[in-house]
């Protein structure tokens, strides 16, 4: 019951913050957000899982009991952790308190509600990364939308309502299509499954129990379900061409919400792709490997080129996230240990680096009240610590050695080159690697114009050093990025243990 306790503590913390007087809400929220972090670290210290949770592995902290006795599919409360889900749970518990700390300066209205929703959002995220029953998982998946919609729509910028509605509509359409695809798959399995258990459904699919649905044969049903489920998760990642909600959401969202949106919410999509498309329906994934890799590579190049053309620092980071998620897709479809393992590692690395980038941009915005590249110049002398960390984060995005981004991308490229299931794997990999050059181009261009050169600011604000509570999260994140870059085995060993069975399904290495 340790995972349930962790979620319950987070939910109670959210309720406490909701009723806390606004003057004390930031401090109370930060202190209470340390409890899930402590719980996550405790789970990590006692983690004894092995293998993959959906493929007969030993699930750590597993808890299962019947929740709703439906016929013919029982709904069970089933949660647990393996080497794929634990790193993402830790990423969530680390980023939330840092995001709360970064909100102390920009959030001035409805403070208690804001921090309460952040903690409610964390509860949903913990559920997504630990649920092993599809129904339970779907409840948490949908629950995440509510706080994120409100956080953008109430505390966002001038076009917040448009951005929030666009985010919600895209997410709901994706969820609906994904749900239809999964339910069709479940009905096609007939009596071979008796619950929504993800492991039970996976085993039935691998045993060839899919018998079709009505006049639709098994192979066609599997293909239809795969495409529907892939579409639903592609919206969340997001992958080109269903990415257009992301830049608007990031630009309008306040800084701490952008941190969690890029740092954790996008990982829900890639995590679900790994669990459902590449584990349950691995044979269809291999059949469609070329178009999936094409979507990934196009996302890499297209996102990077769009970032190159932007003038808003936040929009630059937003488009670069689309590019980074393209690398993750390429790694997953490679079906190698380094490919899928690197993709999972990159989810964590990108979560830390993108969170750091958004926080640093937020600190600059708090001081200058503008994010436009053409309005700022030479602030390095006024904000040397913030600028120094932003430069370090940018180098992390570019894949500088000894930083987490380098480890993740290197593993993905290595795994993609080794792929035996992806025709033309070296070509896809080489094209994707070209994205690094574009990333370096737009980040160096933006930094050279805004951070260095003669000081100039097209506003009346006096730029000075940021307060400690704004800068402290930056130090924590840059420290974690370097630790994972120097010693990737902190996570990669457990990730490798969990993805090995998935790779064996595809006959990869």
Image (cartoon, rainbow, N blue to C red):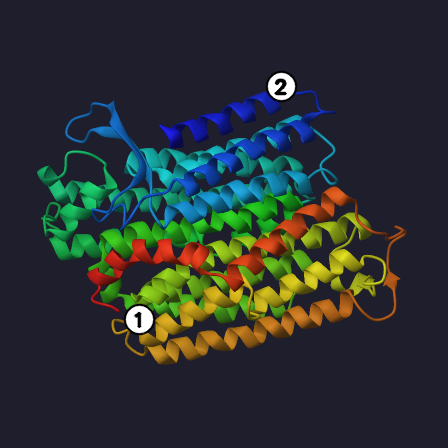
Against 430, is 373 above or below?
Answer: above
Against 117, is 299 above or below?
Answer: below
Give me the residue at 78% from left, 65% from top.
451
Locate the C terminus and report the quarter of the image it occupies.
Answer: bottom left
- Residue 436: which quarter of the image? bottom right
Q: Which mark is residue 449?
A: none
Give me the residue at 79% from left, 49% from top.
466
Front residue (pair 100, 372): 100
Locate the N terminus and report the quarter of the image it occupies.
Answer: top left
SS for tag 1?
A: helix
Give me the residue at 16% from left, 50% from top.
205
- Residue 388: which quarter of the image? bottom right
Against 237, is 116 above or below?
Answer: above
Residue 316: image location, x then y, percent: 63, 62
Front residue (pair 334, 458): 334
Left or right of 192, for residue 480: right
- Can residue 311 be seen here? no
Q: Residues within 10 Å of mark 2 (few under 14, many from 20)?
A: few
Spot the residue most to the front: 45
Q: Which residue is mark 2?
A: 19
Residue 345: image location, x then y, percent: 43, 58
Left or right of 89, for residue 227: left
Left or right of 36, for residue 71: left
Front residue (pair 446, 38): 38
Q: Residues within 10 Å of mark 1 (few under 14, many from 20)?
A: many
The CA distance from mark 2 to mark 1 is: 52 Å
Left or right of 286, for residue 19: right
Q: Which residue is mark 1?
A: 290
């Amino acid at each position: 019951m340790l995972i349930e306790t962790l979620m319950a503590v987070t939910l109670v913390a959210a309720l406490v913050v909701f009723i806390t007087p606004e003057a004390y809400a930031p401090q109370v929220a930060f202190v209470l957000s340390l409890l899930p972090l402590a719980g996550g670290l405790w789970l990590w210290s006692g983690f004894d899982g092995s293998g993959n949770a959906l493929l007969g592995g030993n699930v750590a902290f597993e808890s299962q009991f019947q929740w709703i006795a439906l016929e013919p599919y029982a709904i069970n409360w089933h949660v647990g952790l393996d080497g794929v889900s634990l790193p993402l749970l830790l990423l969530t518990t680390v980023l939330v308190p840092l995001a709360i700390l970064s909100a102390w300066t920009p959030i001035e209205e409805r403070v208690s509600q804001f921090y309460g929703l952040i903690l409610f959002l964390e509860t949903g995220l913990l559920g997504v990364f630990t649920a092993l029953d599809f129904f339970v998982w779907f409840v948490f998946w949908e629950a995440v939308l509510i706080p994120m919609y409100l956080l953008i729509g109430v505390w966002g910028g001038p076009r917040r309502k448009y951005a929030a509605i666009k985010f919600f509509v895209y997410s709901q359409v994706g969820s609906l299509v994904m749900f239809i695809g999964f339910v069709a798959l479940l009905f096609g399995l007939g009596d071979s499954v008796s619950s929504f258990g993800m492991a039970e459904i996976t085993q039935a699919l691998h045993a060839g129990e899919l018998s079709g649905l009505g006049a639709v044969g098994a192979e066609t049903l599997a293909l239809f379900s795969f495409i529907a489920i892939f579409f639903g998760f592609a919206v969340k990642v997001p992958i080109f061409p269903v990415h257009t909600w992301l830049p608007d959401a990031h630009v309008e969202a306040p800084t701490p919400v952008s941190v969690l949106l890029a740092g954790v919410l996008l990982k829900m999509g890639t995590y679900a792709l790994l669990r459902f498309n590449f584990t349950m329906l691995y044979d269809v994934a291999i059949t469609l490997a070329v178009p999936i890799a094409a979507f990934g590579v196009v996302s890499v190049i297209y996102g990077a080129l769009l970032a190159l053309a932007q003038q808003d620092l936040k929009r630059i980071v937003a488009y670069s996230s689309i590019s980074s998620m393209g690398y993750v897709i390429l790694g997953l479809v490679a079906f190698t240990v380094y490919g899928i393992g690197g993709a999972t590692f990159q989810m964590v690395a990108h979560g830390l680096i993108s969170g750091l980038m958004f926080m640093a941009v937020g600190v600059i915005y708090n001081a200058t009240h503008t994010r436009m590249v053409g309005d700022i110049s030479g602030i390095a002398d006024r904000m040397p610590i913030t600028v120094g960390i932003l430069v370090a984060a940018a180098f992390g995005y570019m894949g500088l050695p000894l930083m987490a981004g380098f480890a993740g991308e290197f593993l993905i490229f290595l795994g993609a080159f080794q792929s035996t299931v992806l025709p033309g794997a070296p070509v896809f990999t080489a094209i994707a690697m070209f994205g690094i050059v574009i990333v370096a181009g737009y980040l160096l261009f933006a930094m050279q114009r805004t951070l260095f050169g003669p000081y100039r600011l097209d506003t009346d604000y006096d730029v000075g050093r940021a307060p400690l509570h704004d800068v402290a999260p930056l130090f924590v994140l840059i420290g974690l990025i370097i630790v994972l870059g120097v010693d990737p085995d902190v996570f990669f060993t457990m990730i490798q243990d969990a993805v090995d069975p998935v790779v064996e399904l595809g006959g990869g290495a």
